[in-house]
Amino acid sequence: MYRRMRKALIREIAPDTVLDWIEAEEYVMSQYQSMRFRNWQKVILEHCQWDGIKRAVKRRLRQRCPSAPEDELDWKAGQLWPTMASSIEPAEIEVETFLARQPDLDSIARRSATALRRRDAALRHIEQRRSRRAKEAAQSQKIAATRSMNGKGEGPLVEPTPLEELPIAADRNHQNDHG
């Protein structure tokens, strides 16, 4: 997956400088990490379903026996979960699984958000460089076209300015009391 994403991005942006290559690698790595983190969340929720079932059974037992000690509720939940699990809504089991693994899921969510921020920053840098290069190319073409219009290729075409508008001419007119 990583290699296919990298190949497609490089084909798309055609990096030609070291910075372009670094940003391309950063983009692909960050996107890949984000995808892995999402997969980790899914795996944790699937593999830790037992924790959710046990918590849901224990919660129901606690409702029946509010004064029972935690150790006893844990033991009863371990014994009764096969018979009670079928009466528990799947959404309740999912919620309890999430709550049981919340610190792990939160950590993964933070890592994923960081990876996405890094990916987005790399993409912004790539786009900024491409835009800057396009502007520089347009400017170079404009300068080349201006030089060819002059005929000598010496510099940009400059429109003649009437002498009266030049600051030097205005100062001379003022000094000579012409104005």
Image: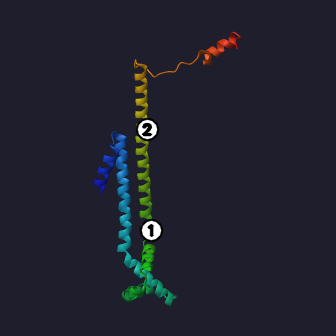
- Say few, some or many: other residues with alpha carbon within 10 Å of mark 1 (under 14 / 14 to 19 / 20 or more): few
The residue indicated by pointer 1 is 103
Q: Earlier in the sequence, mark 2 or mark 1?
A: 1
- Name which residue lies at 43% across and 36% down: 135
- Name which residue lies at 69% across and 13% down: 174
Q: How is the image coloured?
A: rainbow
Regarding residue 55, the answer to whether it shows in the image is: yes
Regarding residue 75, the answer to whether it shows in the image is: no
Q: Alpha carbon of mark 2 to alpha carbon of mark 1: how far?
A: 43 Å
Query: What label does residue 1 carry, if any?
Result: none
The residue indicated by pointer 2 is 132
Above or below, comparing residue 56 to residue 115 in the picture: below
Q: Position of residue 169 (x, y in %)?
A: 62, 14
> In the image as oriented, which residue stretches furthest toward the top?
176
Q: Position of residue 162 (x, y in %)?
A: 58, 17
Which amino acid is tagged 1? Pro
Q: Are marks 2 and 1 in contact (CB under 8 Å)?
A: no
Q: Position of residue 76 (x, y in %)?
A: 41, 88
- Viewport quadrant of the N terminus: bottom left
How many discs mark residues in the rendered view? Answer: 2
